[in-house]
Image (cartoon, rainbow, N blue to C red):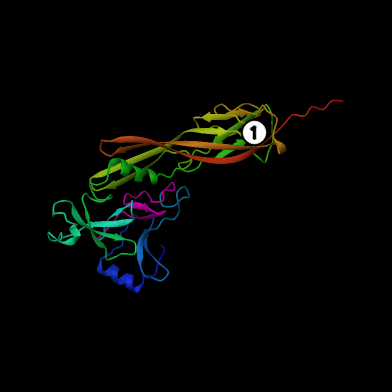
Amino acid sequence: MLTRRIGAVASAVIATAAFALVSAGPAYADYYQCTPDGEYCWLVVETPGGPGEGGGGDDGDPSGGSTNTCEWQGQWVSCFQEGFGWFNESDGCYYILESPQPAAGDPVWEGHAPGDGAIYRQRCFGDFLGTPVWRQSPPPGQPGSITPAQLAARAIRALPMGKPQISVAPQSTGRGLVGLPVWMWTAQTPTSWGPVSRTAAVPGLAVTARAEVTRVVWAMGDGGSVTCTTPGTAYRPAFGGAPSPDCGYRYERPTPPGGLFTVTATATWTIQWWVVGGGERGDATATRLSQTTVQIDELQVVTR
């Protein structure tokens, strides 16, 4: 767990506002991060790794699979903090309903009558006392204000969809020949192929997103391409010169200088999401790519 010094001013404000640490799960820890001068601090949900780098969840989920973490400028923060309310991912501020509401005629109502919207206390990074603001409708992130599609986007962002872990036979350390079979395959791990799933929730609503790779398009570097709907079969010496049964290629053109082709594999993740317990559903796609090189020589015929 990381620790941070809380400046005297910030710590006093935090204590006054009852700004409490929220335990979001055993896979990671919460900590305060402060500016170098200690003037103000904010709560960060620590993760052992980033997307696709491991840590947090079993397959690299940066939020540890938690349903109460939100993303802000590349960091994961608590979606809810006692005394601060709910986090709005569109502006990076927390909002909580003022209680009691200001009296009618208070300038904070901006000319509106009580009952026409409501007054929330807005706390952004560096403003721990907060500012009362009028909102006609609940700010994004508040219970009841988020739509299933918005919550699905949060679940999708937490999906550990990594690059394809590709292999080609022959690899750049070996050599192939024009006209002979080339084998391509990708490791079938949760973060390189799937399936993976994550659930995001707010009070009264939960959405689960699930993703897996449905195809890999191999651009072979000579203008040709192959679309494979399986991870492919890993080559073994026992296969000899046989072609791949499900994901292969043959180079038929003369090789470029040095005989090296750049091979690009683009994996398409197909995503489905649904409201837990029934209701709205949807789908989306995401792509990730990896590259390698393969050396293909031309067969030289020597005559005497």
Residue 171 on image: x %, y %: 64, 38
Residue 216 is left or right of residue 271, and the answer is right
Quadrant of the image occupied by residue 261: top right
Quadrant for the N terminus in the image: bottom left
* Magenta stretch bounds: 58-82
User: Does residue 246 lie above or below 36 as drawn?
Assistant: above
In the picture of the structure, the residue carrying the numbered disc 1 is 237
- The residue sitting at 55% across, 29% down in the picture is 226
Quadrant for the C terminus in the image: top right
In the orientation shown, which residue stands out farthest toward the right?
304
Amino acid type, label 1:
Pro
Quadrant of the image occupied by residue 8: bottom left
Residue 124 is left or right of residue 183, and the answer is left
Residue 212 on image: x %, y %: 43, 37
Queried whether the magenta region covers residue 22, the answer comes back as no
In the orientation shown, which residue stands out farthest toward the left?
104
User: Does residue 3 lie above or below 159 as drawn?
Assistant: below
